[in-house]
Structures are given as C-alpha cells and as structure tokens.
Amino acid sequence: MSTFFTKIKHLKVKLLIQYGVLILLTTCLIGAMFFSLRKISNFSDTKSVSQDLNIELLQMRRAEKNFVLEDLLNEEFYTNNTSTNISDFDRLFLESSKKMSVLLESDVVNQLECKDSILDANNFIHNYYQYFHLLVGEYKKKGYKNWGYEGRLRDAIHKIEKGSLPFDKVQMLTLRRYEKDFLLRKDNEYVQKFDNAFKEFKFSLLKENNNQLISALNDYKKEFHNVVNSEQNIGLTKDQGIKKELYVSLTQAESLLGSVNSQIKDYVNQTIVNTYFLLAVLFIIQLILAVYLAISFANATTKSIVVIKDAISKLSNGEFPEKIDTNQKDEVGQASVSFNNLIDRITIASDFAQKIGEGELNISYDTAYTNDVLAKSLQSMHFQLQKVNEENEKRNWINEGLAKFVDLTRDTSDIKRFYNVILSNIVRYIGANQGYLYVLNDEESKVEFQFMELKAVYAYGKEKYIVERTNIKYQEGLIGQAWFDMESLFFTEFPQEYVTITSGMGEATPTCVFICPLIVNETIVGMLEVATFETLEKHKIEFVNKISESIAGTIATVKTNEKTIKLLEQSQLLTADLREQEEEIRQNMEEMNATNEEMNRKERAMNHRIKELEIEIESLRASNHEYKIVNQ
C-alpha cells in the first residue's frame, strides 16, 4: 500500500482514494447500524408491551380495590349503576386484550415459543374480568344503607324498633350486636350466635302470643341471612368465594406474564448485547483499516512534513518547539511559515496569561496580535477578571463597612453621641462631604402632626451644631417627600439654595444628594441625607441602603426603650397616687365607722328612754283608772 501511494504524484489523488475507502466502510457500518437499531427497536417495543401488560394488571387490581373502597359507599353506584372504577377496569381489560394480540403476533414470542403461556395468561385475565363483574353484581345485591339486602335488613329492624309493639330490648340489642359483629369481622361464629339468640327471642314471644312481632322478627332474620349468603358468596376472606377466584386468576395471570416478561426481557437484552458487540467489531475493523490507510498515506507523503509533525507533537505536549528553518516556497514552506507565526502568537498569549495568573491585571496585550481569536478571548477574559476584581473589592468594601457598623450600633448608652458617631462614620466611610440624620417624632398619632427632628449634622470631618432645618413635616421638601414615598431619593439636580457645603474656602453647592429613609418592619423611624461634590457610586448607595436597616432597627429599639421607661415612670406615679387615695379612703371609712357607732349608741339610749316613758305612761294610766274606780 505504501508503494502504491508513492507512485501517485498528487496529494489530492491520495486523499481522494483514502477518503473513498473510508466513506465506503462508513456506509457499510451505517447500514449495519440501521438494520440492528431497527431490530432492537422492534424487540424493545415487544418488551414494552409485555411490561405494559403487567402494569395494566396492577391498574386493574387497583381499580378493583378502589371499587371496594369507594363505590360500595357511593349512592350513585346503587341508584344509577355507574362507577368510574368499573369503567376503568373495563377499559384496562380491553387494552390488555389488544396488547395480548400484539404480543402473540410478535417475532420475539414466536422465537421464544412462549405463546401457550401468553394464551393461558389471557384466559386467566378473562376469568379475572368475569369474576370481577360477578363480584360487582353480588355487592350490588348485598347493597348498602337503603339499597339491596342491607337496605331491606335496615327496614326490617326499623319496623321492629319504631313499631308500637312492646319487646325485650336487651334481646333485640343482642341480635343487633351479633349482626354488627358479623358485618365487621366476617365470621360465621356470629351467624350461629345470631340464630341462637333469635330462637330464644322467638321462644319468649311465642309464650306471649305476639305473632305480629314474630312475623317482623322472621323478616329481619330472613334479610340478615340474605346479607350473610351474599357475604359468603363474595368471600368472608380472600381465600373464599369470588374473592378467592379473583385472587387465583390474578396471581396466575401475573405469574405467567411475569415469566413471559422475564424471558422477553432476557432475550431482548441479550439481542441488544449481541448487536452492540457486532457493531463494535465492525467499528474496530473500520478503525483498523482507517489507521492503516492513514499510516500508509503518511509514509508516502513528503519527508518535509515530518519536521512540522515533530514540532506540532512537541507543541501538543505542552513544549514550545524551535522555529522551523526552511527556504521552500511550496505548500510545505507556507505551512512552516504559518507554524512559526503560530508559535509567536502562542508564546505571546502564554506570557500574557501567566502575568494575569500572577495578578498583574493592568498589563496590555501586544498590539500586533490583538485581532486574532485567541487574543480576543484572552483580552475578554482579562476584562472580565478586572470587572470581577472590581466587584469583589466593592463587595468586600460593603461587607467590611457592615461589620464595622454592627459594632457601632450596639452602643446606645448615650443616644446623642450614638447619632453623631453613626452619621460621622457613614459620611467618612462613603467619602461624602456633609450629612444629616433625622429621627421621627411620633408623639402625635396622626402623621400630619408628626415631624422629622434633626439629631445630628456632620461635615468635613467635624460635628456641627444643629442650627437649621431642625424639624421637617410630612411631605415637606425632599425629606418629607422621601418620607411620604418611603423610598430613597438620588438626584444631581436640585434648587441652588437647597443645601450648601461650607469649608474654610467658602460655600459651594454639592454635585449630588442622596436621601435614604430608615425603615424597620415597614415603619419609617428616620431619614439619612448625605451630600457630596462627586457622584456617589452604586455600591456606596447599596451600602447606605443596607446599613440603614440596621440603624433603623437600633433607633426603633431605643425609641421603644424610651417609651417603655416613660410608661414605667407613669405607672409608678399612678401607683403612688392610688396608694394615697386608698389611705385617704381608709381614714374616711374609719371616721364613718366611729360616727356610726356613736349614733347607734345614742339610738340605743333613746330607745331605752322611750321604753321607760312608756312604762311610766302605763303606770299613770293604771293609777288614773284606780282613781276613777275609787271616786265612783
């Protein structure tokens, strides 16, 4: 093959021959892959149908359970004979029948010779379907509340209990208890107990010749046994009656389909493995042929390319090769020149990247190579790193400031000093020239009577005495507007006389003013205003907005504490007043008690004197009477 390539004079012809062989091999491989994938797809569909059958059996079982749990307590089932679960069961049965037909016609089933198992499973599914509808019919006959046997049983017992005929309530309650025990526990023992209790009850009624009540009691027994027979037909346990047949049919179908599904799954998986193995073998053969053709072509190509290949190999291994020295003007020479240019570009790019890695972010790229793709990518990376570095510096600046002010907001023992310390540190930290700190005076409940009270002024590194703008009302000026909006204000255009910054060189109007409301729990407690000759950067505004929350929380706490102290003092004063009033009332009560005692004493003496006078009057009357008798 190497000799054959050597005899060919043109590189283009060599490439066409090599590519033609590779295209032919690739076409063969693609054809084999297409046939194999189609076969795998068909087999996978069969496996999917088999798995779907198992899933549909589970869904049919769930529909059966849901019917028992939901529809037996649903009046619509007994009145309209309709049920979503029965419809779902029937739909799943029809779908499973269709999938059985598809499974029986598949090539996989024919090759595995498991058609008999599928037919048996299909018969069991049909049995399961028939027994389910028998179960539905039996449950409907049994009924619930006002329907079926249970409904008639209920009517019979109500006829006895609500009738006018007297009966032994203890014996009746015994029958009802055995009835309820059977319905709850599904045990024939309670049927026997019911019959025995019934005989005793009936015997006692025969003695009383209560034939009407005996007839009603017989109706009750008859309906009870109808319910019992229906329950026995259904199955008191899963190993009896229709329940047993349902369980056997389902388990047999699941077992057969599970076995078939396992066989199909193993067969399909093995087929897939074999197919992939065949494709791998074909791919390896193609790869070996391609490598052989490539080696033959490389050996037949001019030896000058070997020099370029060695240099490229060193470059690919991370080594910088020496420049290729060539005087050729053909394609190989042009390739050598291009390779030398590539080495120059990579070297410059490597040096640039290394300096960036060492943290030199202020360097610039060689202008001779700024337009190539690598240079643009490195310059873009350089720009992004600078941007990230700036963002990190700003973020660190904000975090350091927040940490610093956390400590400052803790000391509120001297509130006036606290206001001055907070304001001065903010002004200095953000590089502003002047600042004002206002605190809301909310002694009046109505906002129109409240005002912002100036607590601290700071400018040019010194605290200033508060001599102007001490109080600002609601919606008054820019401060009042920010109070109304409860939002920060940042502006660079404002009235000339709004604010001036005074220094040793005179007065001047600031470039920008930033007003930030101090808000905690959606309640404003103050305002912070800073003015500067330079426009505030966004990260400084962000810092002021963040720190304002902490300051607002501290001010709110201080105001709350002050109000608490005032309330405590008022409470103490009120307590003292109450104590004085209590003492005065106590003294008044003592005087009133003494006066009452004196009046009672005088009253007792007067009553005693009245009695003495009455005695004297009676004595005089008696004497007068005797005198009259003597005179007569």
Image: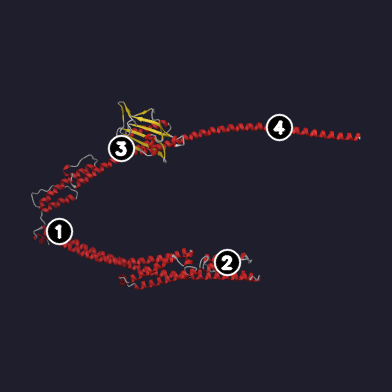
- Please name the residue that numbered disc 1 is placed on: 295
Q: Residue at x 74, y 34 (%)?
A: 604
Decide which of tag 3 and tag 2 comes sooner along the chain.
Answer: 2
- Please name the residue that numbered disc 4 is placed on: 599
Q: Are marks 2 and 1 in contact (CB under 8 Å)?
A: no
**Disc 1 element:** helix
Front position in the image: 219 or 65: 219
Q: Position of residue 554 (x, y in %)?
A: 41, 36
Decide which of tag 3 and tag 4 comes sooner along the chain.
Answer: 3
Q: CA distance from mark 2 to mark 1?
A: 101 Å
Three-letter code, disc 3: Glu
Three-letter code, disc 4: Met
**Disc 2 element:** helix
Residue 112 in the image: above or below residue 325 = below
Nearer to us of marks 3 and 1 is 3
Nearer to us of marks 4 and 1 is 4
Q: CA distance from mark 3 to mark 2?
A: 89 Å
Q: Quadrant of residue 33?
A: bottom left
Q: Position of residue 557 (x, y in %)?
A: 44, 37
Q: Is residue 175 visible?
A: no
- Please name the residue that numbered disc 2 is placed on: 157
**Disc 4 element:** helix
Where does the C terminus fall, quadrant-wise?
top right
Q: Quadrant of residue 462?
A: top left
Three-letter code, disc 1: Ile
Q: CA distance from mark 3 to mark 1?
A: 64 Å
